[in-house]
Amino acid sequence: MGKGDRVISRLLQRGFALIAAFGVSLALAGVAAGQVATDEAPGGREDGQGEASPPSEGETPPSDGQEEDETDGQGARADLSISLPDAEKDAELNRELRYKFRVVNRGPGTATDVRALLNPPLTFSTDGAPDGCEYSRVYESYECKMDELRPGEDAVLTVRGEFDELGFASHTASVRSETADPDPANNLALQRVEIGDDPEDDGKVTSEFEDGIDGWTASGDPAAKPKWVSSDGFARVVDGVRGDTLYQEAPAKFEGDKAAYYGGELSFDLRQSDRDLQFEEDDVILEGAGTTLVYDMKDEPGTRWTDFTAKLEEGEWKVSPSGKGATEKGKRATEEQIR
């Protein structure tokens, strides 16, 4: 059994370092994109004046001349409701989501000491507490306090996070106040969600550079540091030492056990500012299980975007530094422990 045979079946399980190198000035473009978000819930504020019936015979009106909320049916009451008007019933696994709970007072009276309890499912990992809320150990929910909601006024409470398990889950929420509410049935909200895989990405690991550098770093040149170019969505690196080898290194999400990707493809887009200083060097490097596999692209990147694809199987991969061709067993071992 050759060295390549012992190596490739172990590399995809421990970790993987993806490195692309072409010297001079490089730019790496994203491969695929997919995001989930919901539209902003309608909001706004509308002031209103409460109306009250005159006191019945024998009753004493309030001494300050203003009608107060009562619980006997004679005073102006608040009518609070909570809902998720734009929530989707389907969600994708490990995709950022925003759930917007809308609390609104539809009654003629002002609701005081308003409190909402937001209870995401256990399989929904939240990105911190919503604004104006804090986690309550008593209720095991996020408790959101609002001083008051006047007639027609509303508030939107946003929970951000992602589902980390497939299946069904339910968001629940409730709202209450010190003011009498004639219709407590709409003080509760429930949204059942089905979480599934993204049908478009089929398990792909991608960097699309829509919002930033996405964890990519540079090596081989102390002066090099990737910079995000927001207008076109790519990472740009300037090689400060001409003649040195500059690599762009993938973030942690490309590492770990990637054995399931054997037989798949590693694809990326590159371009460079000029082509006057080209030299032979390993173009793509996979490291893992104590072995380094290298791949040499047949073409060099041009001054316009060039598509590159490397099959994740033995093929053109070689064991470094021996230069021997990688075997299927060795390639699988490497992909099991990419770092």
Image (spheres, grey):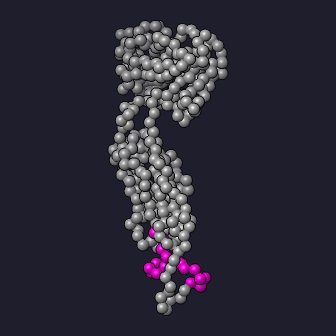
Q: Position of residue 328 (x, y in %)?
A: 35, 15
Residue 220, by quadrant, is: top right
Task: Determine the residue positioned at 44% across, 36% down.
Answer: 34
Q: Which of 27 and 258 is in front in this view?
A: 27
Q: Magenta stretch mostly in which secondary structure?
A: loop
Residue 134 lies within the magenta run:
no
Q: Nearer the viewer, residue 74 or 190?
A: 74
Asked if one can make out residue 138 in the rendered structure from this viewpoint, the answer is no
> Seen in the image, is 90 located left or right of residue 229?
left
Q: How many labels does the image show?
A: 0
Position of residue 196 relative to residue 119, above or below, is: above
Residue 77 lies within the magenta run:
yes
Q: Where is residue 273 in the image (x, y as percent from the top left)?
A: 60, 18
Task: Determine the residue positioned at 40% across, 40% down.
Answer: 93
Q: Nearer the viewer, residue 25 or 222?
A: 25
Task: Determine the residue positioned at 59% across, 85% down.
Answer: 63
Q: Where is residue 201 in the image (x, y as percent from the top left)?
A: 39, 32
Report the quarter where the N terminus lies.
Answer: top left
Position of residue 173 relative to residue 279, above or below, is: below
Position of residue 333 relative to residue 203, above or below, is: above
Q: Which stretch did the figure color magenta?
A: 62-79
Residue 229, by quadrant, is: top right
Q: Which of 218 and 198 is in front in this view?
A: 198
Task: Determine the residue positioned at 35% across, 41% down.
Answer: 196
Asked if one can make out residue 310 in the rendered structure from this viewpoint, the answer is yes
Residue sitting at the far bottom: 58
